[in-house]
Image: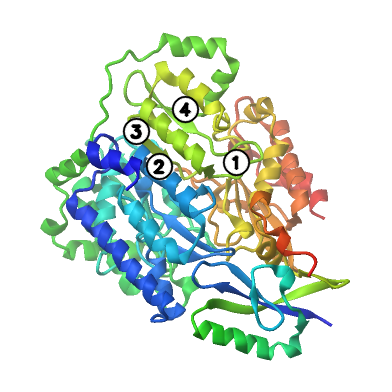
Amino acid sequence: MDTATSIIRASGSAQTGIYHYDALDREYLERRAEEFREQVQRRLAGGLTEDEFKPLRLMNGLYLQLHAYMLRVAIPYGVFSSTQMRKLAYVARKYDRDYGHFTTRQNIQFNWIKLEQAPDILADLAEVDIHAIQTSGNCIRNVTTDQFAGAAADEIIDPRVYAEILRQWSTDHPEFLFLPRKFKIALTGSAHDRAAIKLHDIGVLTTRNAEGEPGFCIYVGGGLGRTPVIGVKIREWLPVSDLLRYMEAILRVYNAAGRRDNIYKARIKILVRETGAVCFAEMVEQEFASLSGDRFNLSPDVVQAISARFGAPNFATLAPESPAFEKAIVENADFARWVSTNTHPHRMPGYISSVISLKPIGGIPGDATSAQMDIMADLADRYSFGELRVAHEQNLVLAHVRKDDMLALWQELQAPGIATPNIGLVTDIIACPGLDYCDLANARSIPIAQRISERFADLARQHDIGELHINISGCINACAHHHVAHIGILGVDKHGQEAYQITLGGAADEKAALGQLLGAAVPAEAVPDLIETVVGVYLAERSPGELFIDTFRRIGMAKFKEATRDGQR
Amino acid sequence: MKLFVVTATRLRDGTILWLGKGRVWNERFALAYPMPEADLGAELAFGAAEVAAQRVIGVYKVEVDDQHGQITPATTRERIRAVGPSVRPDLSYAHSVGDR
């Protein structure tokens, strides 16, 4: 047991904001790690063929990628402690090549894992209550949520509590471990969708009914990949107490009626499309009515018990405004610029959420070295109650920072290169690992992101352009969610050469939309110029204060197509 | 005439391997032994036996370009497998390509 682990075990629930496991939870994780150790030993000894072993390793997050095995570690709903971050840094140093990659599903991936060491890694992770269970395979994956959960000023309920309930319900669920296909659930605790819920198999949006009671609006059948679909609403308002019963009903209908004969038609989106949303909703309601309300009822006691296991940060009573913070903004333009993009309003007076950019200019989106991980863990301890978040945009969040501390925090982020003031801007690019790492990819994603980032490096220009989301996927599986980017880039194989298709006008929020194809695929070296041209059209056409996506929605595709026609020949 | 080499992944650690002269697995691409497709049968059979023996997984042939005796994989995917991630030159195994 290393020092970091000793600290968390000795201190018990010293860190707030993360769900604290009890002896039963820990015994389960240790047992799973031991079970996997036996499976690996049998594989290495020849007792299991690769065909037999593959589903077992995938259920423990272990893939075989282009260069080595890749381990995907779950960060449940993107929330983790400084102790857990230090353990991830330790894994990066001891078992990998000193870095990890934070993903769009709020997980972390290690790219250079040795099969023979994977059981040791899982045992090490279990020491700090983290694991890789159900990060792959045809089961319910890591439930994702809003990176500002429990902190956001506009929050109706704390989605971490319900995400944890769903995690417990879906882990080793006897009916749902062998679904027709993988299954992803996202939920957000406010009416503003920061978790891209309409792009998931089930999307849960918190809302209030006419009486002002909080509940959930349920979407199903969203998904990207080769058949991108925006989820459809099947329940306008669901009482909080019925969340589990409704989830169970949806999964039962999908498990029974989803196709298993064709991997490309096995996702729930195809079932919803072929059945029709109205008919599918009726099937769910029928199943819902048949389930015992008592068995699945989320009583206030149950919710309170789960909530209590998170522990509440010991917030100080502060004035809403911080004179020191305001003064620093006025006196320091660089700090002011960072605050303008890398923060989010907090529900508690005197606090603010801070976003740490993992998108340095020319860097690899989502990558962090072990040294950076250790530094962020230390900063979390000193400034945010020892808690961190992973955003699905591949950045990290310190959710509860005193405004009084923001200048000091910003100064400390400089040296390790994680103070880039670009959240939501053109260089805050979401990119999958692409052909540099991924066995499925057709083209590289990361170098395209790096070239675009370098092209738009000028901060004043970035801030002038304003909010603009670029997502780059290296294949049609769309791990970077390119379909729903303002500017989406898809790597394809064109006669043996890497080429890139551009789409415009996608959105991942409550106005979710699929992007439209700009034109024919272009070679890698043409992409930055093409993006430059697209941005140029926006700048020329925008009304005062208008964002890229709003200009696109107002003027449509024609002017963008016309301006880029030459570059696509 | 198109030339091919045989590749695989080592089971225990996931390392990429290239089949060399004398049917010896090498970590260096430069030591891969190119041959015409028609002559690959015995090499692929050896690879299948290695899979059965649980030493390697994922055996397949890779087309290569031969420039004056120096071979490089014909596709971007295999060039990246031979050299390492193009975005992390510090992790490159570029030394694996080059003189044999």
Q: From what the image shows, is residue A211 above or below residue A523?
A: above
Q: Which chain carries label 3?
A: A
**Mark 3 surroundings within 10 Å by alpha-carbon count, few (fewer than 14), some (14 through 19), many (20 or more):** many
Amino acid tagged 3: Gly
Picture coordinates of residue A456, whole percent (x, y): 70, 35
Q: Which chain carries label 2?
A: A
Q: Mark 3 points at which residue?
A: A386
Spatial CA distance of label 2 from label 1 is 41 Å
Q: Do the residues labelled 1 and 4 touch (CB within 8 Å)?
A: no
Q: From what the image shows, is residue B15 above or below residue B3?
A: above
Spatial CA distance of label 2 from label 4 is 21 Å
Picture coordinates of residue A59, whole percent (x, y): 37, 66
Residue A351 appears in which quarter of the rendering? top left
Spatial CA distance of label 3 from label 1 is 42 Å
Amino acid tagged 4: Thr
- Determine if marks 3 and 1 fall on one subunit: yes
Picture coordinates of residue A1, whole percent (x, y): 32, 48
Q: Which chain carries label 4?
A: A
Is A367 placed left or right of B82 in the picture?
A: left
For the C terminus of chain A, the quadrant is bottom right
Residue in the image at 37% along x and 26% along y:
A382
Is A305 placed left or right of A558 in the picture?
A: left
Q: Mark 1 points at which residue?
A: A553
